[in-house]
Image: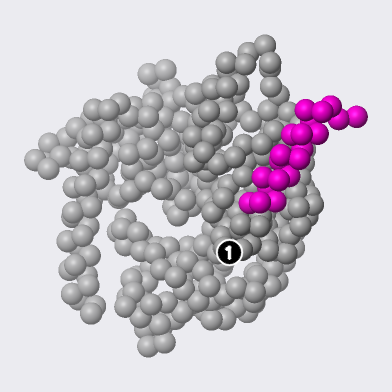
Amino acid sequence: MQSRYETINSYLNKGILEASMEFSKTHETPLCIAKFGFEVDLEDGFFFKNLIALIHEQIGFNPILHFGNDTFLLVLRDTKIHSAKTMIQKIDHAIKQKFKIELKSIGITLFDASDTYKSFLDRLDKYYVMSKLSSRKKIFYGTLDFDFYETNNRNDLLATILKKQNQATLHNLFNGIPIKESVVIAKFDEGIAQVRVNAAKIHFYIKEDFTFIQHERIPNIIKGRIIKVDPIKSLLVLSHLEFLDASPVERGDIRVQPEKRINGTVLFNKAKLLDATVANISESSIALQAKIADVEKLLRTNMVEKELEVEFQIPTDKSFLTKISCKATVFSIVNEMIILSIQPTVFMKSKLRQYIALRQNGLLVDLKQYLKGVI
């Protein structure tokens, strides 16, 4: 039997969530909810207070609801499923860095206009339980249409979703400069997509091998291989569509590619782990292209959970070299690419910011020259 406090808490939670659902439906804005488990130690209330304060700040001071049995619910208003997933990943990473602990289980889902209070929470609970039972993946997520962890035929799933909503966002990079535009999926059949793009931007895709698609009803970024560019009809033809857990689209900071080769070194307790090449860099992360043998060694020795150090040199506007050395942790590994979250000092961050601005200026000059040649 519920205590008086638990009953009041249940009514408050339901009222807040139903009000958020109604607002989302009326104003046609996205709404996500996330559920995580955390066993509260009331003997250390100060620690718990700091933990919740960190989460609250990370989610932009949206509501945090206690849902009983050491579970909590985050109400993420005006947040699409892609942003919710990225936000929760960052929260989990920040907690691991600051408090040296991990959230037990995490489930996320997106509100659909046809949802009731019960169907919305039932779908969230499904992902939360899947995360709780899984020994491999921490965060499970999905929408009414899209269940990433089901074994449904992906082409049938995409065809169903694109029939409901054929608008999407296309993301590309021109030598590191983000190119983003709203597009229409004109046709999708047997894994081949025809995408209608802005005629003025069609030339950006001629030399590209692939592009990234972001769809409001799909929690994962989709990578597609560009097999044909039709400048007359302003169409891209894509094949080999694959769903990605992590992609360049989800990295929020300004990111640039080096003009010339930059070598980097990853260390643990001052001992060298591996050498690599800097693929791209921002103020908060760095992507390193390494040898597959070094990546396997990193995984085999369980260094992905450790606090590491990364060192590399970047050029200045006077052609001098500045050494950057900072703490780092592995954010993700995709094939031979290692993505590190870095924690530069104030001085190091200022040097990184100068280098990024320098590369941006150079890239803008390149872009203007390119546009002169194609327009």
Disc 1 on helix, strand or loop? loop
Toward the top, the furthest residue is: 43
Amino acid type, callout 1: Glu
The residue sitting at the left extreme is 318
Q: Name the residue under label 1.
A: 28
Residue drawn 66% across the image and 55% down it: 21
Q: Is the magenta stretch mostly helix, strand or loop?
A: helix
Horizontally, is 39 left or right of 226 in the view? right
Residue at 67% in and 11% down: 43
In the picture, measured across the screen, residue 330 lies left or right of residue 352, that is right
Start and end of the magenta stretch?
1-20
Could you say where residue 1 lies in the image, as x and y percent from the top left? 90, 29
Visible residue check, residue 155: no
Say which quadrant the C terminus sits in.
bottom left
Residue 67, image x and y in percent? 73, 35
334 above or below 269?
below
Q: In which quarter of the image is residue 152?
A: bottom right
Q: Name the side, left or right, on which 110 lies relative to 202.
A: right
